[in-house]
Image (tube, helix red, strand yellow):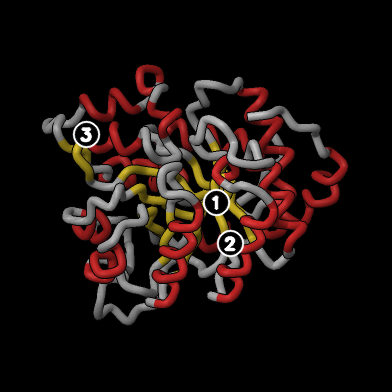
Amino acid sequence: MANVTARSSAHDRNHSKWATAASGWSGMNKQGAARVRLEVVPSPDLLTQLPAIFASSGSVSVTCLPHHGPKRTVETAVGLARLGYRTIPHLAARSISGQAELHSLLRQLQDAGLSELFLVAGDRRTPAGPYSWSGHLLEAVKEFSSDFSAGVAGYPEGHPELSREQLVHNLVSKAPMASSLVTQMCFSAEAINRYLRSLRENGVNLPVWVGVPGPVSTKKLLTMGARLGVGRSLKLARRTGMTGALWRRGDFLNYDSGRLIRDIHRKVAGHPLFAGFHVYTFNDFQRLPNLLSGLPQQAMLLPGNTAGPSFPAKI
């Protein structure tokens, strides 16, 4: 990831705007409901599998894997949107060949009524075009249309290739153009609590979706995690909460994040930046309904439930 030039003046001009937007979250977060959105991987049977366990009024984030490319992500996102889901496609900077491809993707999303994105650098080793990191892509999206809102990634337990100072610098540079932040998978409630405090200390007031794994086998958590946007974070396992979280469980072969989610919710439910949980499902849907139904005061959006969503439509 290339270093970027700090845009402190832009940050100062936009700081008050984002602080005002974030302050509106404090009242909602004190209600006690656990807001949830699911991250899914494009697959042939996704459009039939997902509605069986997660109602179409829910919010779904669609990954962009190096071997799939952004075209498949956009096609999947549009398909889910047609079913009624609030869909957030990922666009990986390193997988986009240039402005022409980017504009084509964005026009497809506009035509489908989608205006919220999640932008990452991506795990492709060599950039396919001019966008080497998410900051470059964020600028290009905003130049195309200011109607798009964009989330960016956060790293509560650090990054194996970047120092803490670099992470802060990069995030502060992107924050004025971003609308939300999604953390990489984290296995420690205390780490999330510290991270939210550090964001405010650095003047970043974006709503934060806390990334947690869904119920998944430990093997799949490790192997699929390396293929998603959490690959680099998994290399930090020995010095993060991941190893302890796995070994504390009686069944090491499977990981169920229900306890972790409840611990995090108790720690940060009242924090003004806490938006909800971003559940990395790895498309392992079999045990997901049990996890979702056990969330704190969660009004579940399973088929047949007519209750309104417990999370906002747009962040």
Q: CA distance from mark 1 to mark 2?
A: 9 Å
Q: Which residue is mark 3?
A: 218
Q: Quadrant of residue 165?
A: top right
Q: Which residue is mark 1?
A: 91
Pinpoint residue 91: horizontal percent, then vertical percent: 55, 51
SS under mark 2: helix
Identify which residue is drawn at 52% across, 39% down: 122
Q: Is residue 180 visible?
A: yes
Which residue type does callout 3 highlight? Thr
The image shows residue 301, relative to residue 184, as above or below, that is below
Q: Is residue 273 visible?
A: no
3 and 2 marks in contact (CB < 8 Å): no
Q: Kindly identify which numbered label has been placed on residue 268.
A: none
Which residue type does callout 2 highlight? Leu
Mark 3 crowd level (few <14, some 14–19, many ≥20, 10 Å Cα):
some
Query: Considering the image in quadrants, where does the N terminus appear?
Result: top right
Identify which residue is drawn at 28% across, 78% down: 305
Whether residue 246 sits left or right of residue 95 in the image: it is left
Q: In this orientation, which residue lies closer to the viewer: 223 or 165?
A: 223
The image shows residue 168, relative to residue 87, as above or below, that is above
Pinpoint residue 160: horizontal percent, then vertical percent: 50, 21
Query: Considering the image in quadrants, where does the C terminus appear?
Result: bottom right
Q: Which residue is mark 2?
A: 105
The image shows residue 138, relative to residue 237, as above or below, that is below
1 and 2 marks in contact (CB < 8 Å): yes
